[in-house]
Amino acid sequence: MVSFEMNDRKKIGLGLTGFGIFFSFLGMIFFFDKALLAMGNILFLSGLMLTIGLKSTMQFFTKRKNYKGTISLGCGFFFVLVGWPIIGMILEAYGFVVLFSGFWPTLAVFLQRIPILGWVFQQPFVTSLMNRYRGRRVPVHSHQIASCQKFPTSANSAIVASRKLCNTFTSGGSGDDGGGFGKHKI
């Protein structure tokens, strides 16, 4: 079973990841300052390792389908350290898109649920643009369906919400976002 609790290590990892993104952004604003870009890269990678763990990070970067993104990200990091920050950032941007393209639908759903900013992402032209670039469909595995049968019927709102989520798994039905989890694209 996957644990989603936030311990101190994960909090520090998320902070380092955030600072890494911030320093990379500052490095690009200050005309590709190689010191800020290198610091941003180091903080981002160390934050990622602390957030998801060293073993999971290594497995993520060494998956066969992620080789192109990993090599591109590594070469970009090397070029930033050597002193060619523009070429390095282009390679890193390509590697980042290739590696993390599977997370865009999750980010899109998150952005749509932000109170004020979500209104922009719920507009028809924006949702059609996001749906166009979603990618392949996610299969629903039998162990996910079997785990849904463990919830008892109760008036408790958390259990009711969990049962609703499980019903979208088993029937591929429609939830609040217009499609069940069996129909989401990634």
Image (tube, rainbow, N blue to C red):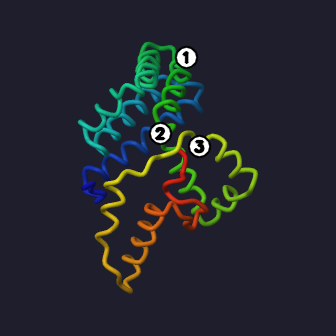
Mark 1 residue element: helix
Percent of width and height locating residue 126? 71, 50
The residue located at (42%, 19%) in the rendering is: 71
Mark 3 residue element: loop
Percent of width and height locating residue 142? 34, 54
Mark 2 residue element: helix
Residues under labels 1 and 2: Cα distance?
Answer: 18 Å
Note whether 117 is above or below 90 in the view shown: below
Judge depth for marks 2 and 3 and give the one in front: 3
Label 1 sits on what residue type? Ile
Label 2 sits on what residue type? Ile
Picture disc at residue 134: 3
The residue located at (32%, 36%) in the rendering is: 46
Label located before the other in sequence (2 or 3): 2
Percent of width and height locating residue 13? 32, 46
Label located before the other in sequence (1 or 2): 2
Q: In this orientation, which residue lies closer to the viewer: 184 or 58?
A: 184
Percent of width and height locating residue 149? 32, 68
Label located before the other in sequence (1 or 3): 1
Note whether 24 is above or below 35 in the view shown: below
Judge depth for marks 1 and 3 and give the one in front: 3
Q: Are marks 1 and 2 in contact (CB under 8 Å)?
A: no
Residues under labels 1 and 3: Cα distance?
Answer: 28 Å
Q: Which residue is mark 1?
A: 87
